[in-house]
Image (cartoon, helix red, strand yellow):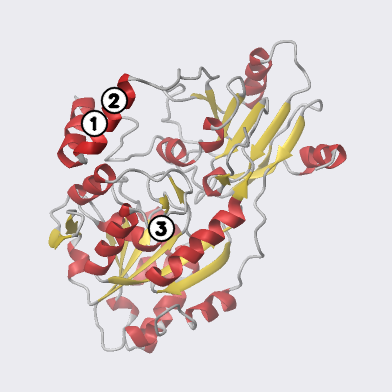
Amino acid sequence: MSFLETVLSSITCTEIRTGAWYGDELFTLDLPDNWTLKVHSPQTPPPLTDDQIAESFERPTGEAPIRELCRGKSRPLVIVDDLNRPTPACRVIPILLRHFEDAGIPTRAVRIIIATGTHGASTEASIKRKVGSTAASECEIIIHNSEDEPARVGKTSFGTPIYVDKAVTSSDFVIGIGGVYPNETAGFGGGSKLALGVLGFRSIRHLHYRHSGMGWGQPNTSHTLRHDLDEIARMIGMRTVVAMHIDARRDVIRLTSGDPSIFYSAEVEFARKTYSVPPPGDADVVISNAYPNDISVTSVHMKGLIPLVRCAPKASRIVVASCPEGLGHHGLFPLFNRPKHSRLLYIARRLATANPRDMVRKIVARAHPSKQPVKRNPIWLYRPGRHSSDLPFRSAEFQVTNSWSEILAAIREEHPGKRDLRAVLYPCAPLQVLEPDPT
């Protein structure tokens, strides 16, 4: 990029989005004139029309169309990821309901389960946003609770006990709807990982602690965790999945349906290629917009900080997120309101499920660290647009403010005597995969 192009981008490309599911507002970051800005926007294809989405349902991968698969069935169940994922399920559910009707299944007989995993319960308003008003009012909506008494299905070849929501075992046709997004534990979400959202707490705990994490946006679909999830999906009857990709405005840009064991690798490759961006390098200021995963502080912490971890040690760090649902909740890895003795509980769970060889390796690594931790500037959490009133002004992870001028003042203090700062902006960081650092 030439100097002129960089300067122009700093003027025209600072308009970004915030408040996923809660207005999806546009706002502009006002940057000092003497800053040089690079905006790492993904190069995505045009959004799909409703007709194009409907057409993709006629050409599933490795399977017949859904109307044929569910003919003769009477108790279908649709697994949908919750608002912590930005998947616009409301775009495809009306088409799915038409397929059910073509197969002789009325809308009132369709059940939709919100796959919360160990997240907090979804509200009635959030369900309507996720699945659409027709489905919310005419279908039976079930909110999964991992702490409820589940059904025992069996055990995978990896030894994972499968406890699943009873709504799954009482259905005769199970289909999942989700997006393919970068993920620290599984490399990418979507595909068979949708099954995790309807499992009991014991199964979810086992999956997270028994397998080593892949790292953010890694394409290894042959990892043991992926194989374990594939087994679970087959054993609970989820053999059909609708997978979506979205752009920086949360519009659908690609949709695939059918057998995830056939199409999933290609969808991961598409996501990596489409959302691959350079790392921050030696930028003075790194701005990570947590949209479209900016629903809560917990979601931001898990999905929106990757560029801020990969930046230079002395860089100023800002994450942008309106957090309309406040602190948020994660039952397995709570960021706030941790139970008493949570550290001891965490260690006990690790010991109960982890591979002994892996545990010894980690203990040795902690006892003999290869390098000293890098001291960095604090992370500023900037909350534009709508924001909840119950969010603490400061937390252990962030310095929180809704004042952009306060952040600019802090950046000046972090770079004394330096006016011409180089800034980099990631407009949809939770969707983006950072390339390896050349250094």
In front of the other: 174 or 156: 156
Circle 1: residue type: Val
Picture coordinates of residue 92, whole percent (x, y): 47, 71
Picture coordinates of residue 318, whole percent (x, y): 58, 29
Query: Callout 2: helix, strand or loop?
Result: helix
Is residue 276 rendered to the left or right of residue 144? right
Say which quarter of the image contains residue 7: top right
Look at the picture and state if 260 lies above or below 130: below
Q: CA distance from mark 3 to mark 1?
A: 26 Å
Q: CA distance from mark 2 to mark 3?
A: 28 Å
Mark number, residue 221: 3
Look at the picture and state if 78 lies above or below 313: below
Residue corresponding to mark 1? 360
Quadrant including the N terminus: top right
Query: Callout 1: helix, strand or loop?
Result: helix
Query: Is the Cβ of the residue at disc 1 closer than 8 Å to that at disc 2?
Result: yes
The first of marks 3 and 1 along the sequence is 3
Question: Which residue: 23% across, 77% down?
Answer: 172
| Count of all numbered marks drawn on residues in the image | 3
Circle 2: residue type: Val
Q: Nearer the viewer, mark 2 or mark 3?
A: 2
Say which quarter of the image contains residue 198: bottom left
Q: Residues within 10 Å of mark 2 (few under 14, many from 20)?
A: few
Query: Callout 3: helix, strand or loop?
Result: loop
Residue 410 visible, this angle? yes
Question: Which residue: 56% across, 67% down?
Answer: 254
Q: Residues within 10 Å of mark 1 (few under 14, many from 20)?
A: few
Residue corresponding to mark 2? 364
Picture coordinates of residue 311, whole percent (x, y): 59, 29
Residue 321 visible, this angle? no
